[in-house]
Amino acid sequence: MSKQNQELDNFIGGQYKHGFVTDIQSDTIPPGLDESVVRVISKKKQEPQFMLDWRLRAFAHWQTMPIPAWAHVHYPPIDFQEISYFSAPKSADDAPRSLDEVDPKLLETYEKLGIPLHERARLAGVAVDAVFDSVSVATTFKAKLAEAGVIFCPFSEAVREHPELLEQYLGSVVPYTDNFYACLNSAVFSDGSFVFIPKGVRCPMELSTYFRINEAKTGQFERTLIIAEEGSHVSYLEGCTAPMRDENQLHAAVVELIALDDAQIKYATVQNWYPGDENGVGGIFNFVTKRGDCRGHRSRISWTQVETGSAITWKYPSCILRGDNSVGEFYSVAVTNNFQQADTGTKMIHIGKNTRSTIISKGISAGRASTVYRGLVKVLPGATGARNFTQCDSLLMGDRCAAHTFPYMEVKEPDAQIEHEATTSKISEDELFYCRQRGIEEEDAINMIVNGFCKEVFKELPMEFAVEAQNLLAVSLEGAIG
Amino acid sequence: MSAMIESLQDNFSRQPEAPGGEFVHQVRAQAMKEFLDIGLPGPRDEYWKYTRLRIIEKRLFGLPEENAVAGSEIGIENLDAIRIVFVDGLYAPALSDESVFAENGIRLLADALHDDPGLANGLLPPPDPATHQFAALNRAFLGQGVVIDLAAGQELGRPLYLLFYSQNTGRDTASHPRILIRAGTDSKASVIEHYDGAPGNAGLCNALTEIDLARGAQLTHYRIQTESETAFHLGSLFAHQAEGSRLVSHNLSLGGRLARTNMQFELLGRGAELVLNGLYLASGKQHIDNHTLVNHRKPGASSFQDYRGIIDDQARAVFCGKAVVHRDAQQSVATQSNRNLLLSEGAEIDTQPVLEIYADDVQCSHGATIGRLDADALFYLSARGVPEDEARGLLTFAFAEDVVLRLENQTLRNALSKHLIGRLPDLENADELVAR
């Protein structure tokens, strides 16, 4: 075996560092899915009637939908009756008011993950709405946000306390009829985050949520809704890790963003869920629908994602550029290893005049993994002055991995300018040689080159995440190739 | 069942007896069955995502009349080439250089099938009928076309000019020409396929070309489609390239109410080189679709693809260019460029440059642009006193001419430049551009 392959195997052998299960009694309903399950979930959440009706409509529609198979990913069929659709930590019944009331075992879990909740929140000035399985257990800095008029709360709380906002906005970006997994989510979504930034408010801190999947065989169906009113501004961070499991776990989240006139939403994700072991056993199925609607003039939505985890990632954070002069951005790094598969990309729909979009996608494949960039840039008639720039680059490490690019461009407006470019290559011998010659260890050199490859995306991340993302990449590429 | 399929079935039962006897008859029957089993592409067929055949489905196409007539002035004038002409899909001896082609290894398909019925299966493995139902349809009507057999080391001194001309007789007919090109080791040739038609012709041309290049063979292939704006064109081209062979493909899709061309290339040996040069021009209500697929199956092959498109009026163009580098096809080089110019409101372009890579030591890239004319270039011309309309016309012509200038044959270059000048807007006084 060549040196290159040995080092590659070292890299591939890198163990998942966040694999453990917290032993907490969970209030889980038995596996299976029918109308009564939808009703039980809604009842447990003490939801108003409109919410239940919406869920039931979604469920009825879901039963008519075929399972989609167009993505460039392979996995055994999912038995939706095998999954339990609700799981809440016991302590959720007497909803904790502060960190002191939170189950210490939960806090311990966060400690292990390197997320000292209170410390982190205090030091970094970040309000954390940590989701543990399905129910939010701690919310910090609420007072400070409330002072600014910002609503940042668990989704289930928003359903009870702000039903008028929910009725107005829920499903207005991703209707329940949108796709199979979004529809399933609409029927059985458990919890998530709700953010409302009122007119003219600049959110005083970065908002962050940690999603965790803990209970075995519990699919997580998060739902996030962010509304930025006229002239407001918010930056939202989402990151996740999950314990080691042998069985594939389904995660089908929905994220909806709404930006009104002059509003700005920045949504950043670091996704590091369990990718399965080196033989491709286990790992999370991450089938997510994320979409932002630039509803107002001069609004701006920016997606940044670093995808290193999950056995299968299947998601396309998208922007609907409805308002004139609105801007959509998508920055993505997707790293796959072993048998991981990622089919990810974005959609930019140009409807308003002078709308602009930028797509920067970096894919890194190693081992037997495959990454796919799949993107759509669509310019409708009348979207004069629309402008798009797309760049997607792939880096291949090893001769068994794969990288694909499937861009779609549909333009019906002559006054639009669309540019797309893509490259696929491996780390060049010249670059490596240059570094080695200057005394830089091979591994450090590779890290440096890979970080350079991803730099355009990392610089879009908020500070805390940029550091975390670089570390994540360094860990993923331990002993990579030569 | 659609009217079109019914008429094709009727044609099938009435078509002249197969040359080559029972074997060819069987091949035809099997192919017709394959075609009918698959039927026309449906609305959920990804391969036909942007091209719906609704406007063809309701049409009736008859069999061509035996006594084809057409003037001798058809096709490209003054072309120094061996000329073989088909009118409405039927061989027209009066218009062809019959005496010249026999000695060059060039035969009519009907004659070749008499000698070797096995040719009915084609030169290459038949493509999957699930996506290539029209290739099966072509086989079901096998009989008209040309077989070119180049011996090892043979060089064809003059280009071979194959003209497929559709008349406007008031009757819509369907033709299914087949061109088989087998180039032996280190042979060299240039083949021009020209699909042309009289204004008002609304027939269907379902042509299929197979190219098999042995080691070191070199072929320059032109596919020029200038049918009438009411005609329907479905074209396929399949090519296999052995090591060290070189194929240059010029594909100009300029005519047709609805025109779809599928081209698939298999690079099967080290050093195989493929150059794809393409232009599509859609105006009025035209719908022009070009699909290319390049399979790098063995290490060390290269493909270079450059397609350009101009879309005007209410027309729509589709381009899907796919390069696949298969496992272990290391040291592959695949580049692709697709540039599009949208000239008016109501025009539409759908483009998909696809890369599928299963090997790591490769250099692959693609780029696509969609836009209008460069404002700086327009300003440059305006600043020098060129009226804006004229400046637009010149720049649009220059954009398309880049592709035409890559054709090696000067007579063809001039003829196509003239065609472009006739088609593109704001080029009233541009004839002097060609006289070079």
Image (tube, rainbow, N blue to C red):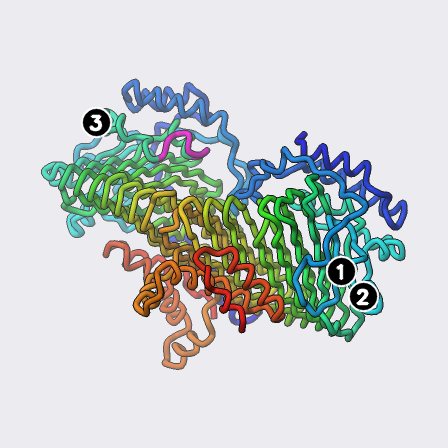
Q: Which residue is mark 1?
A: B84
Question: Disc 1: which chain?
Answer: B
Kind of element beneath mark 3: loop
Q: Which residue is mark 3?
A: A162
Which amino acid type corresponds to the residue marked 1 in the rendered image? Ile
- Residues at marks 1 and 3, common chain? no
Question: Disc 3: which chain?
Answer: A
Which amino acid type corresponds to the residue marked 3 in the rendered image? His
Mark 3: few, some, or many residues within 10 Å (few <14, many ≥20)? some
For the N terminus of chain A, give its image quadrant. Answer: bottom right
- The range drawn in magenta is A174-181
Residue B85 occupies quadrant:
bottom right
Q: CA distance from mark 2 to mark 1?
A: 9 Å
Q: Position of residue B214 (x, y in %)?
A: 74, 68
Q: Position of residue B143 (x, y in %)?
A: 81, 49
Q: Position of residue B224 (x, y in %)?
A: 62, 58
